[in-house]
Image (cartoon, grey):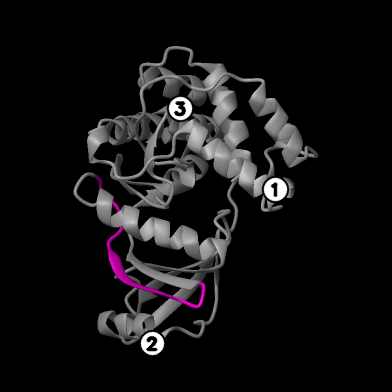
Amino acid sequence: MQETREVPCLAPALPDGIAAALRERSSTWTWLQNTVGQSGSTVWRLTDVNGSNAHYLKCGTGEAAGAIHDEVVRLRWLAPFLPVPQVAAYEMADSEAWLLMTALPGETAWQLLAAHPEQAEAVVDAVAAFLRQVHAIAPESSPFSATAPERLALARARIAANLVDEADFDEERAGWSAAQVWDALQALPLPSAPAVVTHGDFSLDNILIAGGAVTGCIDVGRAGLADRYQDIAILWNGLGEFGAGLQARLLVALGEGEGDRTRIDFHLLLDELF
């Protein structure tokens, strides 16, 4: 189940401000390029000569640059509430954005599940506890909203602009068109539960764990007020790679019993369009 998720690489050409920020932190960096994720950005992990002092660097243009800007403002908003990376440097010019962040300690939840299946139940319990912490942030503290009607409007605009990557749909929808996903969405009811603060892309690759506890979350560019099943659905879907038993354990740990499959289906369909 293991797969290569980083490859060694040379340093790219950097904007002056990002290069200066890196020089302030170390004279020598080792570069690894990330091979997973669907943000449209290029992501590198950097460590100093001792293999420590890790940072992440993101670069994107066009729509990806906008997503990086969204992440910067949300990282700064979430910092008092959750353990998230610190913004070390940020530059945006000519529709290109660069974001340098500190790294959180630990391994991703996906890495732990893949390498240590004997820890799977403990990982699920730790992630569920952290997700409850996210959803407990006071809604009035959020300046960002990502409710279902708002995301549907954005999804419709993305379809019209041919921005949906139909080749990246989940296996259950392989071969579908974006229009077919949209039609399936229209057949489901809009979530009506009160909105809570959500992460927005609460996947196993975006949760860090060390010593049995979650040390924080990354890729928060979609964070905002939404139905809590926005997060539950993506996490539940990712756990399917490791067995239905873990999916069921997650729902119970979150107090959802057997879960609301209609809301799960709604959010998984909606996520395909982003």
Give the secondary structure at mark 3: helix
Q: Nearer the viewer, mark 3 or mark 1?
A: 1
Name the residue: 43% across, 12% down: 257
| Circle 1 Cα neighbour tier, 10 Å, few/some/many (<14 / 14–19 / ≥20) | few
In the drawing, does residue 125 fall left or right of residue 152? left
Instruction: Find the distance from the CA under tag 3 to the CA under tag 2.
Output: 42 Å
Camera-side residue of 176 and 24: 176
* Percent of width and height locating residue 134: 30, 36
- The tag on residue 205 is none
Label 1's element? helix
Sequence-wise first label, 1 or 2: 2
Q: Which amino acid does label 1 sit on?
A: Ala
- Residue at the far right: name it: 175
Q: Where 138 falls versus 99 (above or below)?
A: above
What's the residue type where badge 2 is placed?
Asp
* Residue identifier under label 1: 160
Q: Is residue 186 left or right of residue 114?
A: right
Give the residue number, with chain letter if any, for mark 2.
16
Residue 243 appears in the figure: no
Q: Mark 3 points at which residue?
A: 229
Q: How far apart are marks 3 and 1 (CA)?
A: 26 Å
Up the image or down, 123 lies above or below 104; here it is above
Q: Can residue 3 be seen in this view?
A: yes
Residue at the top extreme of this rendering: 257
Q: Which residue lies furthest to the left in this view?
A: 80
